[in-house]
Image (spheres, rainbow, N blue to C red):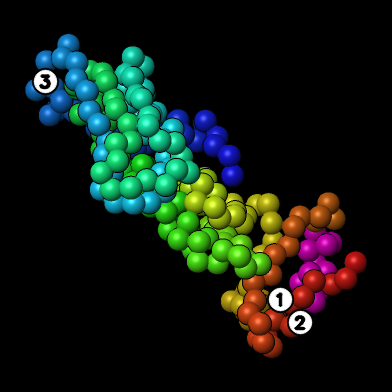
Amino acid sequence: MTIIPQHIKDTVKASLNEDIGSGDLTARLLPETLISTAQVITRQSGVLCGTEWFDACFLTLDPECRISWQAQDGDRIRPGQTLCEISGRARTLLTGERSALNFLQTLSATASATRRHVDAVAGLAVKIMDTRKTLPGLRHAQKYAVTVGGGHNQRADCMTEFSSRKTISRRQAASRPCWMRHSTWHPQGFPCRSKWKTGCNWMRPCRPVPS
């Protein structure tokens, strides 16, 4: 999944509004013209992800802020490594750091966890795929992080693809007629995805009807 600039803008705006609202009281204690620098140094190994969300947090507050990265999304990082240096108004750095680090930590954690699973099945005819079990408002971001970690995306929402699984099959009797209804409702052909386990008898009648 590729990055959508509007999604970054929207999620960053929501995060800043949640954190500082009408203003950062603590940041006001600093002189308005004070310029400062800061570094982000990682404490553990992993896969870096979320740099564009990180940047947007500071640039939204002050377009003159400067951020210099020494690593990029997808890079393996090690403890003690300097990831970036930020330079700008001290108030901006203080106000934006929590939201910026939240994005960087959350998305790097998603990418790192994905990479561990991808490495575990290396050499096998297996793909590590995501789900829709994401944090509210961060689905696109976390699905992007999965791809950064070497994983693959499944459907992003309920609007673009049908899905049949155990709970639906039992409660709605999702069998051969279910797939036939799909073809009738949407002749243009939305994708269908079945989730089942090898040897589970309950899923046998839910296999797609041959065209």
* Figure quadrant of the C terminus: bottom right
Disc 1 crowd rating (10 Å Cα; few below 14, some 14-19, many 20+) is: some
Q: Which residues are magenta?
A: 176-185
Report the number of discs. Answer: 3
Q: Are marks 3 and 2 in contact (CB under 8 Å)?
A: no
Between marks 1 and 3, how big is the CA–CA gap?
63 Å
**Amino acid at pointer 2:** Pro
Disc 3 crowd rating (10 Å Cα; few below 14, some 14-19, many 20+) is: few
From the top left corner, tell me how far across and down residue 98 is, in percent. 25, 38
From the top left corner, tell me how far across and down residue 123 is, in percent. 61, 65
**Amino acid at pointer 1:** Ala
Between marks 3 and 2, how big is the CA–CA gap?
68 Å
Q: Which residue is mark 2?
A: 205
Q: Toward which corner of the image does residue 36 lie, by quadrant? A: top left
For the residue pair 111 and 160, the one nearer the viewer reads as 111
Q: Which residue is mark 1?
A: 174
Q: Are marks 1 and 3 in contact (CB under 8 Å)?
A: no
**Amino acid at pointer 3:** Leu
For the residue pair 118 and 90, the one nearer the viewer reads as 118
